[in-house]
Amino acid sequence: MWKKKTTDLKKKSPNLKNKLDTVFSRFIRLRDARKDGTFQCISCGRILPLDQADCGHYINRQHMSTRFSEKNCNAQCRSCNRFDEGNMQGYRRGLILKYGEPAVLLLESMKTQTNKISDFEYSAMIKYIRARLNVWKKRSRYAKYDIYGTFRKYESDTCVFVSSK
């Protein structure tokens, strides 16, 4: 009658996947940020404040082979990403301008590949992306968003926090 309590390894993966999604999305938005705290939408080209950026995927997130590809993910305005179903025609044009047509064709061919990611790989990718975020943070001397999404304007050795909301 009593069921044996077992640890299910599959319970770990969604938590790690969600954590990687969060860190990777933050990294992509910061990577595509401009020095003045804005970004340019890859699909429509509008320039907006960074706090209005989404991490848009050209190939849908359900395809694990491209889900965490840096070429597949770019800063996109919320309007294009959420309400215009990704504005795929504009996104494709933006990708071709940014990376070239061969890279876009390669992304499109990767869509059909099967990719299963282990818990160890999730943990390693999280550490790697966090390290890249920290390197990016140290390189920038001007106004920027930190890894937590807070807009910071650096003046000499002091840091002045400016609310982004």
Image (cartoon, rainbow, N blue to C red):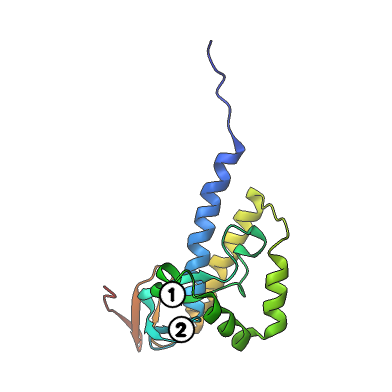
Measuring from the top left, give residue 118's x and y in whole percent.
67, 49
Q: Is residue 119 above or below residue 71?
A: above
Determine the residue located farthest toward the top in the rendered image.
Answer: 1
Q: Is residue 7 left or right of residue 39?
A: right
Measuring from the top left, give residue 40's x and y in whole percent.
45, 85
Q: Residue at x 57, y 63 (%)?
A: 60
Q: Residue at x 39, y 72 (%)?
A: 78
Question: Which of the two labelled residues, at mark 1 and mark 2, occupies the earlier sequence position?
Answer: 2
Measuring from the top left, give residue 4's x and y in whole percent.
57, 19
Q: Secondary structure at mark 2?
A: loop
* Viewer can see residue 165: yes
Alpha carbon of mark 1 to alpha carbon of mark 2: how far? 7 Å
Q: Secondary structure at mark 1?
A: helix
Q: Residues within 10 Å of mark 2 (few under 14, many from 20)?
A: some
> Tag 2: residue type?
Cys
Is 92 or 14 nearer to us in this picture?
Answer: 92
Residue, disc 1: 80
Is 148 or 46 nearer to us in this picture?
Answer: 46
Measuring from the top left, give residue 97's x and y in whole percent.
60, 88
Q: Residues within 10 Å of mark 1 (few under 14, many from 20)?
A: many
> Tag 1: residue type?
Cys
- The answer to whether the residue labelled 1 contacts the one labelled 2, judged by CB atoms less than 8 Å apart, is yes
Residue, disc 2: 44
Location of residue 46 by image quarter: bottom left
Query: Which mark is on residue 98?
Result: none
